[in-house]
Amino acid sequence: MIVKEEFLSKLRRYFGLNLYEVKIWTALLSRGVSTAGELSDIANVPRSRSYDVLESLEKKGFVIMKLGKPIKYVAVAPNEVVERVKKNMKEDAEEKITRLETMKSTEVIGELNTLHTQGIELVEPTELSGSLRGRHNLYNHLELTIRGAEETVTLMTTTQGLIRKVDSLKPTFEKLKKRGVKIRIAAPITKECRNAVKDLSEVADVRHVDKISARFCVVDSKELIFMVLDDKEVHPTYDVGIWVNTPFFASALDGLFDLAWKELKPALQIVKVQ
């Protein structure tokens, strides 16, 4: 049996299996019922490993072992396997979340916070900066930084960036609004982002900008995150941002933003005209 490497790679990624497991599983699927020895030959997996691999697949719900001699294995229908894997992943994720939540009330988190606090005290202010690669990491750090805002959050983004922020940041914005944090967002407003404007206007002051193209966030005039690439021209995986804890530069950028802000039209007005 010949199975393309690309197909095996997809199976490994989707189901979380190793190479021997996907080889044995696909071999069994092609036969329906087979012995470990037969599967070893078909899948080109060492016989010494085939029994361990089949035992692992059995525990994960991919195969069923038949009673009798010689021992044979039956392939579970792929649709059923998907449901079993989903269930196992969900249970595993819930267990890990519970474990982490429980840790919050233990001395472990206290010791970690102490280590972090003491470490930060030893760091030079110029070293409180970092590079963020990939849009997923970027938004994780952006959400973390914004979550700690006490007074102001200033955001400038693109049309697509505005749409993305509804899903990723609106819940955080809602919590900040309840705490009295002032949130300002500037972006090019088009028909494409009409719904995003309506959603974000519930928690922030959103205005239209068409002469400036930039992506950055300033929190409390102290911390700054700016994206160095145009999101229209870069794949999300290769997006890059810079985080800097620099009150001097952040407050200066906030001041420049204030000057432009006064001339910007409210986004809801632009949306009504379109």
Image (cartoon, rainbow, N blue to C red):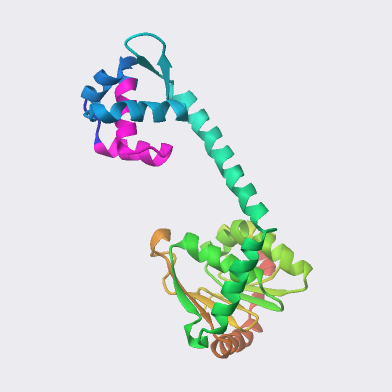
Q: Quadrant of residue 245?
A: bottom right
Pick the quarter of the image with the N terminus.
top left
Q: Taking 6 as reference, is 257 left or right?
A: right
Quarter of the figure that contains the C terminus: bottom right
- 88 above or below 101? above
> Of 236 and 161, which appears nearest the observer?
236
Count of numbered badges drawn on the protein: 0
Task: From the top left corner, tell me how far across and down residue 186 is, in percent.
Answer: 60, 73
Residue for point 59% across, 67% down: 112
* Residue 121 drawn at (x, y percent): 57, 83
Left or right, residue 94 beside residue 137? right
Query: Would residue 231 appear left or right of 186 to someone viewing this image?
Result: left
Residue drawn where x is 59% and y is 58% of the image: 168
- Establish if 167 lies above or below 129: above
- The residues colored magenta run 5-28
Residue in view at x 60 percent, y 71 percent:
145
Q: Residue furthest top?
A: 68
The residue closer to the viewer here, 148 or 47, is 47
